Image (cartoon, rainbow, N blue to C red):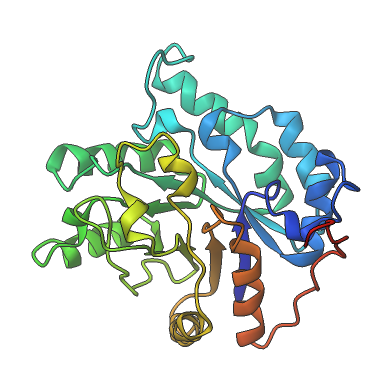
Amino acid sequence: MISVGLAGWGDHDGLYEKGAVKPESKLKIYGRHFSIVEVDSSFYAVQQEKTYSRWVDDTADHFSFIIKAYQGMTGHLRGKNPFADDDAMYRAFCDSIRPVLESGKLRNVLFQYPPWFDCTRSNVDILRGVRERMRDYPVALEFRNQSWFAEDTREKTLDFMKREAWIHSICDEPQAGVGSVPTVLVPTSVEQTVVRMHGRNAAGWNQNGSPDWRATRYLYRYSRDELAEWRDRLLRLNEQTGQIAVIFNNNSGGDAAANAKQLMELLGMQPEPFAPRQLELFE
């Protein structure tokens, strides 16, 4: 089964009638368009348990969540850690997402590691420790350093992920140096796989000194031909893994929702139309 969704639900303006939707109502409307979402606010702060309970209540029984691991759990955190130690941090995170797990709506927890997290023995040990802490949860793993998929490490990385029960988060992203990874079309779980569509903005992928670099990093709109290629890839992957979640993250220019619906059409799905939109004076 293939599910298509977006990273977050608040910033995709095409889904909501302009000026007529309160922020707290957006997830309910999002759920009319897509059956899965990636929660990215969990990366910046451990959310309250009651927040997840509300999100569970706001979504249909068949809806599911990919929850991005808190930044302190993946080595992204800069500055003071708000938790006393790692045990407290993991406990708080796992306690917070309990409503999603108990509702059956948790697809997985996504651990996306930074570009400086390279393929070394110490980092492999870190992954083993994380997997042990998260042993009661389905966890997906995404790298941002090419060394994990170099010619001499690729098969070892994939075998390790299979042994340790890591779900592969397959990336579509620009090939822009060591801080990007190739598209490796190999599931590491027979149960599920994640595909994250980051766009192919090679010029904007790496830190370039621009103050708005992060705001434009994912500025890319996939062509129909590029999406058709991914349709064929997904159909082949679907023969090897039970569930595939495709998450579009190319929203610097507001392209994610439109591209997601295009892919759904190519897969034979019938996506909901965009919200009605009142034209501005000079449009």
Q: Residue furthest front?
A: 282
Q: Residue furthest right?
A: 20
Q: Nearer the viewer, residue 75 or 198?
A: 198
Q: Residue furthest left?
A: 152
Going 56% across and 27% down the picture, which residue do you hit?
45
Give coordinates of residue 111: x percent, y percent.
42, 45
* Res. 118 image quadrant: top left
Give coordinates of residue 54: x percent, y percent.
80, 39
In the image, residue 26 above or below residue 168:
above
Going 63% across and 49% down the picture, which residue do you hit?
8
Q: Nearer the viewer, residue 232 or 236?
A: 232
Q: Is residue 123 left or right of residue 102?
A: left
Going 49% across and 43% down the picture, which residue do you hit?
215
Q: Is residue 15 left or right of residue 172?
A: right
Going 68% across and 57% down the picture, which residue do you hit?
64
Badge count: 0
Quadrant location, the N terminus: bottom right
Q: Is residue 232 left or right of residue 264?
A: left
Give coordinates of residue 65: x percent, y percent.
64, 52
* Res. 50 image quadrant: top right
Give coordinates of residue 67: x percent, y percent.
57, 46
Quadrant location, the C terminus: bottom right
Q: Nearer the viewer, residue 234 or 240?
A: 234
In the image, residue 122 above or below residue 11:
above
